[in-house]
Image (cartoon, rainbow, N blue to C red):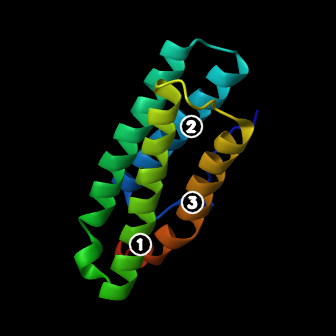
């Protein structure tokens, strides 16, 4: 089981978005714990549903600021969001229909994607929120 811990390096200097990243990490950690505890399908389905819904809500918050960015960067970032949402929807549908299991590979993919996204492309909008003194 691989839990993620939010740290200052992940900050984008916006309280609302940082809080949402923490919540996203919380949901991912819940999923890891639930799988490790071999919780039933109903519980796991609920957490995956929460992950899908919250991720979409969070991305829409970030994207509210993207008109302030260079269009190419905004487009690239939105594409990362779209691709991830498509992927997690696929996992959700696959799991809920019984076609797919929540493998270690999937859990690792989710964790790695979220951490790399926050430390990577999300940092490219953080200058918008840095206090200028
Ligand atoms: Fe993002």
Q: Are marks 1 and 3 in contact (CB under 8 Å)?
A: no
Q: Is residue 91 above or below residue 128?
A: above
Image quadrant in which you'd find residue 68: bottom left
Q: Is mark 3 within 8 Å of ligand 1?
A: no
- Which residue does the numbered mark 1 point to in the structure image? 77
Name the residue nearer the viewer: 41 or 67. Answer: 41
Quarter of the rendering occupied by the N terminus? top right
Q: Residues within 10 Å of mark 1 (few under 14, many from 20)?
A: many
Residue 15 percent coordinates (x, y)? 38, 54
Image quadrant in which you'd find residue 115: bottom right
Q: Is mark 1 within 8 Å of ligand 1?
A: yes
- Which residue does the numbered mark 2 point to in the structure image? 28
At x 42% / y 43%, what residue is drawn? Answer: 89
Q: Which of pointers 1 and 3 lies earlier in the amino acid sequence?
A: 3
At x 34% / y 78%, what residue is drawn? Answer: 74
Q: Which of pointers 1 and 2 lies earlier in the amino acid sequence?
A: 2
Q: Which of pointers 3 and 2 lies earlier in the amino acid sequence?
A: 3
Residue extending farthest front? 99
Name the residue nearer the viewer: 133 or 51. Answer: 51
Name the residue nearer the viewer: 84 or 65. Answer: 84
At x 56% / y 54%, what residue is drawn? Answer: 114
Q: Is residue 127 above or below residue 12?
A: below
């Amino acid at each position: 089981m691989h839990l993620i811990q939010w740290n200052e390096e992940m900050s984008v200097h916006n309280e609302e978005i940082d809080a949402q990243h923490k919540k996203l990490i919380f949901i991912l950690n819940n999923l890891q714990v639930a799988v490790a505890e071999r919780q039933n399908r109903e519980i796991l389905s609920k957490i995956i549903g929460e992950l899908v819904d919250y991720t979409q809500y969070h991305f829409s918050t970030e994207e509210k600021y993207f008109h302030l960015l260079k269009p190419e960067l905004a487009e690239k970032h939105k594409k990362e969001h779209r691709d991830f949402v498509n992927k997690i929807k696929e996992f959700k549908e696959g799991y809920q229909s019984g076609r797919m299991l929540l493998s270690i590979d999937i859990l690792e993919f989710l964790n790695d994607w979220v951490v790399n996204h926050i430390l990577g492309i999300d940092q490219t909008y953080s200058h918008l929120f840095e206090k200028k003194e």
